[in-house]
C-alpha cells in the first residue's frame, strides 16, 4: 500500500495544472506537524441520548442511534453486489429474504405512505445485477408477487436500465457502488453477456483508504474506528464526499474542519490540514493495491448457467440438444466440429464451464481502466468495440469525484488499440444532469412507462402457473 501511495504521489507531482504549470504538493511531514498540534473544540455540551427502540427490529438510519451495548444482531442483506449469504446468524437465504422484505415493507409504509394491504394495486420493477444468481432472482420475484402481494412485476438488468436513464442507445456501462464495481457493454437495451465483469471494490474501499491516508498525516480524531462505530463510518464517508476530488489545479495543503457528534458525548470540532490524500484515495480505483486493508477481493465474470429443475427447456437443455444434433450431422458427413450456431448465440461444443468467481490478491486486481478495456475487447465485432470506446457511462454513487471522468478518459485514450480507436471518447459522469446514483432507478422507471414494456409484466397467477419458465417470454434480456 505504501508503494502504491508513493507511486500515485509521484504521478500527481509530475502532472500539469490547467495553466500548464507543474503541480506541487505540501510535504506530508509539514501537514502531520500541524495536525498533531490541533486540539478538539467543544461546540456543544448538550448530550443526545441513544434511542430506545419500540420494537425488536430496527431498520435503516435508526440503527445508528442504537446503544451499542444492546443485544442486537446487525444484518446487511446485500454485500459486494449480491445477496449476503454466510454461515453466521441471519446468513441463510430464507433469513436474507426475510430481511429484504422487512426493509422494503418499512420503506413502502413509512417513506411512500402506502398501505401494505394495497400493494395488489401497485406494480414493481425489480432491478437485478447483470451478473445474477438465478435462484436468488427467482426467490426475489416470488417475494414480490407471492410474499408481499404486488399486482405485477418485471425484471430489468441494472446496466440496461442505466442506458435508459441516460437516454443512450449504447454504452459501456461502469457502475461503481459502495462495495462493488461492475462493467458491461449495452447495445439496444441488451447487456452483452460475455462482456460482464464485476469486482468487489467500490466507494467504501475508497473511504477506508482515505482514513488510512489521513492517519499517516496525523489525523487528529485518533479514536475513529469505522469497523466498530457506525457513527465513525458515516463521518468518514461524509469526509470523503466533502474532501476527495481529482482536480489537478488544487495543490498544496487545505485547512478543513469537521464535527463529531455521538449520543452520550459532547459534540466537538476538529480543524486539520489535508493535502494530496484527497486525490490519492479516489485514484485507488485505478490502482487497487491501495485497497489492500479491506481484505481479499473477487473478480466475477458471467458463468454458464446450470440446469434449473423448474425450467426443463433451459439453456442447458438447448445446449445439449444442439450438441447432439450437430454431432449426428457431422457423423453423417464424416467430419468433426467444435462450433454450432443455434438461436441468437454461438454455442461451442464441449464448452468449458467458464466464468465464475475468482479470489485474487489486491496486486492482481484490475483497475477501472483495465476493467473497461477488458470488457470492450470481449465484444464480438470491431465496429461494436469502436462504438463502446466512444461512449463510457459512469453510474452509481461510488465515483462522484470532480474531474475523475477526465482522468479516466486520459488513461483510456493511451491504451485503446489503434484499430478500435473512435474519433471521440465521451466519458459521461452526469447523464442528462441526473445524479449518477439514481440514473439506473430513473431508467427502470422510464422503462415501466414504455408501451413495449406492457408485455413484460408478470402477474402472481402467471408466476404460480409457470414459475421461472415464463421469463423466456417476458424478460427484456436473453434468458
Image: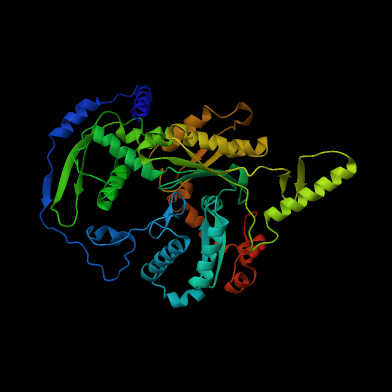
Position above or below: 260 against 123: above
Residue sitting nearer the eye, 331 or 477? 331
Position above or below: 360 against 8: below
Which image quarter holds the N terminus? top left
Residue 8 at x, y percent in the picture: 37, 27
Give the left or right position of residue 63, taking residue 47 as reference: right
Residue 404 at x, y percent in the picture: 41, 37
Choose top left, top right, bottom left or bottom right for residue 213. top left
At horizontal 59% and vertical 33% (from top left) the residue drawn is 422
Residue 297 at x, y percent in the picture: 44, 41
Residue 453 at x, y percent in the picture: 61, 63
Q: Residue furthest front?
A: 87
Viewer can see residue 44: yes
Position above or below: 191 against 108: above
Q: Residue furthest bottom?
A: 117
Choose top left, top right, bottom left or bottom right for residue 195. top right
At horizontal 38% and vertical 59% (from top left) the residue drawn is 89
Give the left or right position of residue 447, taking residue 222 as reference: right
Amino acid at each position: 500500500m505504501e508503494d502504491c501511495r508513493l507511486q500515485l504521489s509521484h504521478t500527481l507531482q509530475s502532472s500539469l495544472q490547467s495553466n500548464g504549470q507543474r503541480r506541487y504538493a505540501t510535504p506530508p511531514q509539514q501537514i502531520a506537524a500541524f495536525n498533531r498540534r490541533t486540539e478538539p473544540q467543544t461546540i456543544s455540551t448538550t448530550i443526545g441520548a441513544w434511542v430506545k427502540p419500540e420494537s425488536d427490529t430496527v431498520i435503516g438510519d435508526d440503527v445508528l442511534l442504537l446503544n451499542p451495548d444492546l443485544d442486537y444482531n446487525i444484518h446487511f442483506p446485500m454485500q459486494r453486489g449480491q445477496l449476503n449469504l454466510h454461515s453466521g446468524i441471519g446468513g441463510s437465504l430464507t433469513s436474507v429474504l426475510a430481511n429484504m422484505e422487512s426493509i422494503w415493507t418499512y420503506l413502502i409504509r413509512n417513506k411512500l405512505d402506502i398501505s401494505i394491504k394495497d400493494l395488489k394495486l401497485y406494480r414493481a420493477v425489480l432491478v437485478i445485477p447483470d451478473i445474477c444468481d438465478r435462484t436468488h432472482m427467482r426467490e426475489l420475484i416470488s417475494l414480490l408477487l407471492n410474499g408481499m402481494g404486488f399486482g405485477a412485476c418485471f425484471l430489468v438488468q441494472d446496466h440496461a436500465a442505466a442506458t435508459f436513464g441516460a437516454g443512450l442507445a449504447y454504452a459501456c456501462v461502469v457502475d461503481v457502488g459502495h462495495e462493488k464495481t461492475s462493467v458491461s457493454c449495452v447495445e439496444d437495451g441488451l447487456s452483452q453477456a460475455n462482456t460482464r465483469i464485476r469486482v468487489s471494490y467500490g466507494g467504501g474501499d475508497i473511504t477506508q483508504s482515505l482514513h488510512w491516508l489521513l492517519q499517516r498525516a496525523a489525523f487528529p480524531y485518533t479514536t475513529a474506528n469505522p469497523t466498530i462505530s457506525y457513527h465513525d463510518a458515516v463521518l468518514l464517508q461524509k469526509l470523503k464526499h466533502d474532501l476527495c476530488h481529482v482536480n489537478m489545479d488544487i495543490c498544496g495543503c487545505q485547512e478543513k474542519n469537521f464535527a463529531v457528534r455521538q449520543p452520550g458525548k459532547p459534540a466537538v470540532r476538529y480543524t486539520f490540514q489535508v493535502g494530496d490524500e484527497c486525490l490519492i484515495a479516489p485514484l485507488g480505483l485505478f490502482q487497487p493495491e491501495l485497497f489492500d486493508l479491506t481484505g481479499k477481493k473477487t473478480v466475477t465474470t458471467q458463468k454458464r448457467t446450470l440446469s434449473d429443475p423448474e425450467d426443463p427447456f433451459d439453456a442447458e437443455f438447448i445446449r445439449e440438444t444442439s450438441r447432439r444434433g450437430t454431432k449426428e450431422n457431422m457423423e453423417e458427413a464424416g467430419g468433426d466440429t467444435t462450433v454450432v450456431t443455434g438461436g441468437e448465440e454461438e454455442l461451442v461444443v464441449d464448452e468449458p464451464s467458464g466464468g465464475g468467481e475468482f479470489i485474487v490478491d489486491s496486486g492482481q486486481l484490475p483497475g477501472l481502466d483495465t476493467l473497461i478495456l477488458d470488457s470492450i475487447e470481449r465484444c464480438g465485432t470491431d465496429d461494436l468495440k469502436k462504438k463502446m470506446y466512444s461512449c463510457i457511462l459512469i453510474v452509481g454513487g461510488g465515483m462522484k469525484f470532480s474531474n475523475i471522468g477526465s482522468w479516466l478518459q486520459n488513461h483510456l485514450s493511451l491504451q485503446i488499440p489503434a484499430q478500435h480507436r473512435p474519433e471521440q471518447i465521451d466519458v459521461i459522469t452526469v447523464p442528462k444532469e441526473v445524479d449518477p446514483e439514481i440514473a439506473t432507478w430513473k431508467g427502470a422507471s422510464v422503462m415501466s412507462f414504455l408501451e413495449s414494456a406492457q408485455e413484460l409484466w408478470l402477474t402472481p397467477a402467471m408466476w404460480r402457473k409457470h414459475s421461472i419458465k415464463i421469463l423466456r417470454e417476458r424478460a427484456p434480456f436473453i434468458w
